[in-house]
Amino acid sequence: MPDPILYGPQFSTYVRSARLALEEKGIAYRLDEIDIFGDPKAKVAHLARHPFGKIPAFEHGDFALYETSAIMRYVDEAFPGPRLQPSDAQERARMNQVFGIIDCYAYPSWTTGIIIPRFRAARTGVAADESAIEEVVPRARRCVNILDKFLNGREYFAGEGVSLADLHLAPMCFYFAQLPEGKRLFGHAANLTRWWTEMSARPSLVKTTPALTRK
């Protein structure tokens, strides 16, 4: 069977989460960096892969899949390599709980509310709406505090080793930890800061560092 293909730009946090699962498993794959944001034709064509027009999408031979969590779980279960989901039911449930926190609460506050406006302002030179960012900071802080509490006495979010939960959160932390709001909130979250320092040094994270910010 041919190598799997992942569709989406390398700077996307969700695309990177899926890439991290592939990298941690040691799987050869191809990243097809479709431009669904700047190329209308690419966006239309992508609807055949993802009917909601989101990223990433995934193909493994004639098997097509979309939704990041589904892709990451398939990668872990379909390929050899280190197990990325705990075998213990409670730890696996914890992993799934962290997935929900990331997608439902951290992404809207960290990424939509702070990361995207800050990076858009830096790219365009148009000032961000500071009042809108400040409004979302309490929700971002709550996510930081809850995730920090999960790591109290634990090296990783679920089980004894890196799981899909760690790989799902790391790409978001990469951007958030660079920003003033992220630095301020992480400064009060020793567990999360320790975790991110260790995660950011993993070979899979280093290899998939987005080119937009790679020094």
Image (cartoon, rainbow, N blue to C red):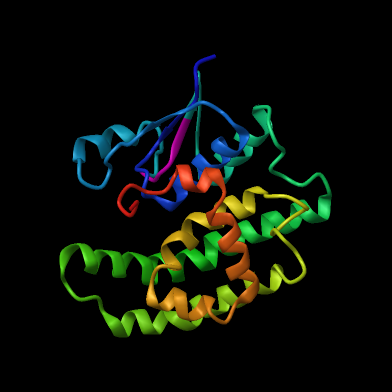
Residue 69 placed where, x, y %? 57, 46
Q: Magenta: predominant secondary structure element? A: loop
Residue 20 placed where, x, y %? 53, 43
Q: Is residue 44 left or right of residue 29?
A: left
Q: Residue at x 49, y 25 (%)?
A: 4
**Between 215 and 5, the one nearer to me in the picture:** 215
Residue 134 placed where, x, y %? 37, 84
Magenta span: 53-58
Residue 34 in which image quadrant: top left
Q: Is residue 80 left or right of residue 112?
A: right
Residue 117 in the magenta stretch? The answer is: no
Question: From the viewer's perspective, is residue 213 above or below residue 104?
Answer: above
Q: Residue at x 27, y 41 (%)?
A: 35
Q: Residue at x 72, y 61 (%)?
A: 155
Q: Which residue of the protein is positioned furthest toward the left in this rendering?
A: 125
Quadrant location, the N terminus = top right
**Between 20 and 41, the one nearer to me in the picture:** 20
Residue 91 placed where, x, y %? 78, 55
Q: Is residue 126 left or right of residue 98?
A: left
